[in-house]
Image (tube, rainbow, N blue to C red):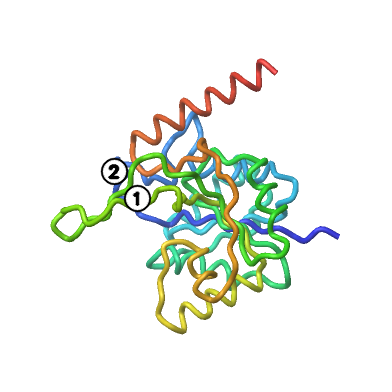
């Protein structure tokens, strides 16, 4: 029997770099709020049974109305966010009962493919986590506090990491519990699992799986969605 898959979607950030008068979570993207695009794509994936969005406390009622309006039925509960991204995800992780697979995906990545999710789930056996990554194209230089170059690093040894990140519920719960016991905050969920001694595998990411951080990213996402729509029509 296939394991249950639960997707946690953090979307409680302030979005300082994005700017604008509308919170990034709900900014319009091709006629729908950004977060609705993301949750809609996840809800189309048959292997995902439950989606847990994490919103700012004062956005929960707005989110509840939107998810009902767009019939995102896999959202059965909404969690209030915390001070940091890690706190927000921890609030959701603590609600998960029993053994399942946990996918953690940024609410600001609306162009997530079912193919990428399938690859994560397929590669989870025998490791503690699977994450998508892209090769680094530009030259990487290490600098000091004054902006002076210290060294040029080998970019072949580095990957730019995306979400979703996949773990079993037991692994991610233990990793979070250890992180809080030690007062550790990581830059992503995999870093907590790595720190707890877990083995994390990287699979090829998707260059179209962009994260909306700035207004320019939003324009790029519009073009990518239009491109996908045209491809679907031509097929």
Q: Circle 2 sits on which residue?
A: 19
Q: Circle 1 sits on which residue?
A: 15
**SS at mark 1 in the image:** loop
Question: Is residue 172 among the parts visible in the rendering?
Answer: yes
Q: Is residue 2 positioned above or below 21 on the image?
A: below
Is the N terminus in the top left, top right, bottom left or bottom right quadrant?
A: bottom right
Q: CA distance from mark 1 to mark 2?
A: 7 Å
Q: Marks 1 and 2: CB-CB under 8 Å? A: yes
Residue at figure coordinates x 66%, y 73% from the top left: 170
Relative side of 82 to 204, left or right: left
Task: Check disc 2: other Cα within 10 Å, few if <14, some if 14-19, many if 20+.
Answer: few
Across and down, in percent, residue 64 comes to 55, 52
**SS at mark 2 in the image:** loop
- Residue 205 disc label: none
Across and down, in percent, residue 142 comes to 27, 55
Residue at figure coordinates x 20%, y 53% from the top left: 149
Q: What is the quadrant of residue 24 in the picture? A: top left
Residue at figure coordinates x 65%, y 52% from the top left: 120
From the viewer's side, name the closer residue of 76 and 135.
135
Question: Is residue 52 among the parts visible in the rendering?
Answer: no
Across and down, in percent, residue 161 comes to 48, 51
Q: What is the quadrant of residue 171 in the picture? A: bottom right
Residue at figure coordinates x 69%, y 41% from the top left: 44
Is the C terminus in the top left, top right, bottom left or bottom right quadrant?
A: top right
């Amino acid at each position: 029997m296939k394991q249950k898959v639960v997707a946690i979607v953090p979307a409680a950030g302030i979005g300082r770099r994005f700017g604008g008068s509308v919170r990034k979570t709900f900014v319009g993207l091709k006629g729908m709020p950004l977060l609705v695009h993301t949750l809609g794509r996840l809800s189309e994936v048959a292997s995902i049974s439950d989606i847990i969005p994490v919103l700012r406390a004062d956005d929960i009622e707005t989110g509840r109305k939107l998810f009902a309006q767009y019939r995102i039925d896999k959202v059965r509960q909404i969690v209030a966010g915390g001070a940091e991204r890690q706190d927000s995800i921890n609030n959701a992780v603590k609600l998960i009962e029993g053994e399942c697979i946990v996918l953690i995906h940024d609410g600001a990545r609306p162009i997530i493919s079912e193919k990428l999710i399938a690859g994560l789930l397929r590669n989870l056996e025998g490791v503690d986590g699977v994450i998508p990554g892209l090769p680094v194209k530009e030259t990487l230089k290490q600098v000091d506090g004054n902006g002076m170059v210290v060294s040029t690093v080998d970019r072949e040894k580095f990957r730019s990491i995306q979400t979703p990140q996949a773990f079993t519920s037991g692994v991610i719960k233990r990793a979070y519990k250890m992180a809080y016991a030690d007062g550790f905050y990581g830059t992503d969920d995999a870093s907590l699992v790595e720190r707890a001694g877990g083995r994390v595998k990287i699979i090829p990411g998707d260059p179209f799986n962009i994260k909306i951080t700035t207004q320019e990213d939003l324009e790029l996402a519009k073009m990518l969605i239009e491109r996908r729509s045209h491809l679907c029509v031509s097929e």
